[in-house]
Amino acid sequence: MATAPTAPARHSRNRRKASASLTLHGGLVVMAFVAAFPILWIAYISLGADKFDYQHPGRILDRPSLSNYGHVLTDTGFGTWMLNSVIVAFGTTVVGVLIAASAGYAVSRIRFLGRGTLMYTFLLTQMFPVAVLMVPLYKIMANLGLLDTYAGLIVIYCSTAVPYCAWLLKGYFDTIPVDIDEAGRIDGLSPFGTFWRLVVPLARPGLSVAAFYTFITAWGEVAYASHFMLSENKYTLAVGLQTYVSQFNSQWNYMAATSVLIALPAALVFYVVQKHLVAGLTAGGTKS
């Protein structure tokens, strides 16, 4: 007959559990600090009125100022950059999610020739770095007359976001029972009607993750926007940000203030879709 553990044994186990919990929480605190420090530092630097205050951070505590934000909002092209970024980011999000959702649903539900090849082709496109793709994409955009246009940049960003989102949504659609599609067909819905009316509402968590990823891809991208948007009135925020730093002049205070302003819309989008993010990211891991 088993005997109850002695008091010293219980105390030893409790100490080990407390030590493991303390180590875990300590590690989480350190990682959270490492992740948050660059953001907090940029926000702090943005309060320095002089462009050299970043070299002497102690001065900012003595005379913090919001003058950098005032200058960025009123004396630069920030409004135009913001509008351009909103057009490109939301255009990419809408078009990219529609294409990715359609592709993911088709691969999840329809058994057609080349189904597996299509998905692995999507995966293959993710393996090429931007430096390799820049020249051929520039030539293609030039031949199509899409250089320096919103549509051209949206197409480029969709080519980056759609492959990943198609894989993500395919995994999510796999978790939705096929019986729902069959019920829709019995009720007289077309394949597209079944997808739009029945499956899409159930896939909102997965669609939210795809939309967030697509939005962030377009919102903060620099390389393509720098080379494909040639007119100053077409600059996005990421490109406009570079105008503060040149070979002979570096206005890090304005750059820091603009960085904070750029981050606010992305944080707002994250706040809106956050309740769906965890469900959307984990649902595709297993098939119910």
Image: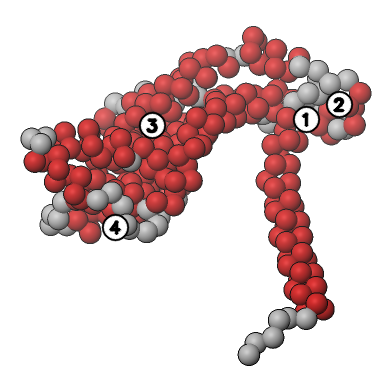
> CA–CA distance between discs 4 and 3?
23 Å
Name the disc covering residue 93, or none.
Answer: 3
Q: Distance between the residues labelled 2 and 1?
A: 8 Å
Q: Is residue 221 left or right of residue 286?
A: right
Q: In this view of the protein, can residue 141 be seen by the observer? A: no
Q: Residues within 10 Å of mark 2 (few under 14, many from 20)?
A: some
Three-letter residue code for mark 3: Thr
Q: Position of residue 287 (x, y in %)?
A: 33, 58
The answer to whether the residues at label 4 and label 1 have Cβ atoms under 8 Å apart is no
Between 50 and 178, the one nearer to me in the picture: 178
The quadrant in which the N terminus is found is: bottom right
Q: In the rendered image, which residue does mark 2 sit on?
A: 60
Q: Is mark 3 on a helix, strand or loop?
A: helix
Mark 4 — residue? 120
Give the numbered dot on residue 44: 1
The residue at 34%/29% (across/down) is: 94
Label 3 close to label 1 by CB (< 8 Å): no
Residue 157 in the image: above or below residue 75 = below
Nearer-N-terminus badge (3/2):
2
Q: Do the residues labelled 2 and 1 touch (CB within 8 Å)?
A: yes
**Mark closer to the chain start, 4 or 1:** 1
Q: Residue at x 24, y 51 (%)?
A: 177
